[in-house]
Image: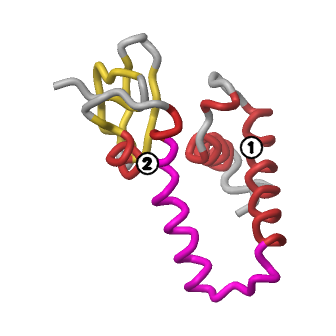
């Protein structure tokens, strides 16, 4: 039986550690974490809104649990979200400067991390990478 990620039909999937590399019917490919793959793959094609809802609802749940675990003050939320966004944008900008073969809207957080880690390995851990 066919499986889909959104509207894209999966032709092949290969496990790569904690990730699944997918090849789609149109010849394109994607690399998803096993967690993301497990909630993204469906037996029927689905629109982008439904796909994002399936993908991002568990992320929101995890983020809310982390905020609860740390008992973050409501007055700190705007600052925290801006800090998080700035950190991701900084790491993304650094990774873009190194090498890309994906459009901006196709990149994932793990793509950024993988590129920065490859540079860290080449420089023996000497990097300005933000955590």
* Up-down relation of residue 66 to residue 25 (above or below): below
- Residue sitting at 35 percent across and 46 percent down? 17
Membership of 70 in magenta stretch: yes
Which residue sits at x=60%, y=30%? 106
Pointer 1 local density, CA inside 10 Å: few below 14, some 14–19, many at least 20? many
Q: Earlier in the sequence, mark 1 or mark 2?
A: 2
Q: Nearer the viewer, mark 1 or mark 2?
A: 2
Residue at coordinates 33% horizontally, 28% vertically from top-left?
4
Residue 92 is labelled as 1
Q: Quadrant of residue 13?
A: top left
Quadrant of the image occupied by residue 25:
top left
For the stretch drawn in magenta, the main secondary structure is helix
Residue 65 as seen in the image, left or right of residue 124: left
Residue 64 is situated, as x and y percent measured from the top left of the image, at 57, 73
Q: CA distance from mark 1 to mark 2?
A: 24 Å
94 in the magenta segment:
no
* Image location (x, y in percent) of residue 115: 63, 40
What span is colored magenta in the figure? 52-77
Q: Which mark is residue 54?
A: 2
Q: Secondary structure at mark 2?
A: helix
Relative image position of residue 116 (x, y in whole percent): 67, 45
Residue 12 rendering spot, x and y as whole percentages = 28, 23
In the picture, the quarter occupied by the C terminus is bottom right
Question: In the displayed structure, would residue 45 be above or below residue 108?
Answer: above
* Residues marked 1 and 2 touching at CB (< 8 Å): no
Q: Nearer the viewer, residue 80 or 44?
A: 44
Say which of 73 and 100 sits in front.
73
Of residues 88 and 5, the one drawn nearer to the viewer in this rendering: 5
Q: Quadrant of residue 92?
A: top right
* Residue 50 sits above or below residue 82 on the image: above
Numbered-mark total: 2
């Amino acid at each position: 039986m066919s499986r889909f990620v959104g509207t894209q039909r999966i032709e092949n999937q290969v496990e790569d550690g904690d990730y699944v590399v997918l090849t789609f019917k149109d010849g394109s490919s994607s690399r998803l974490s096993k967690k993301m793959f497990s909630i993204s793959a469906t037996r029927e094609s689905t629109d982008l809104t439904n796909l994002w809802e399936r993908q991002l609802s568990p992320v929101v749940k995890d983020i809310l649990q982390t905020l609860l675990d740390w008992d973050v003050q409501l007055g700190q939320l705007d600052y925290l979200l801006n800090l998080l966004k700035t950190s991701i944008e900084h790491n993304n900008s650094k990774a873009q400067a190194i090498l890309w073969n994906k459009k901006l809207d196709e990149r994932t957080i793990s793509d950024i991390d993988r590129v920065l880690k490859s540079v860290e390995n080449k420089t023996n851990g000497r990097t300005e990478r933000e955590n």
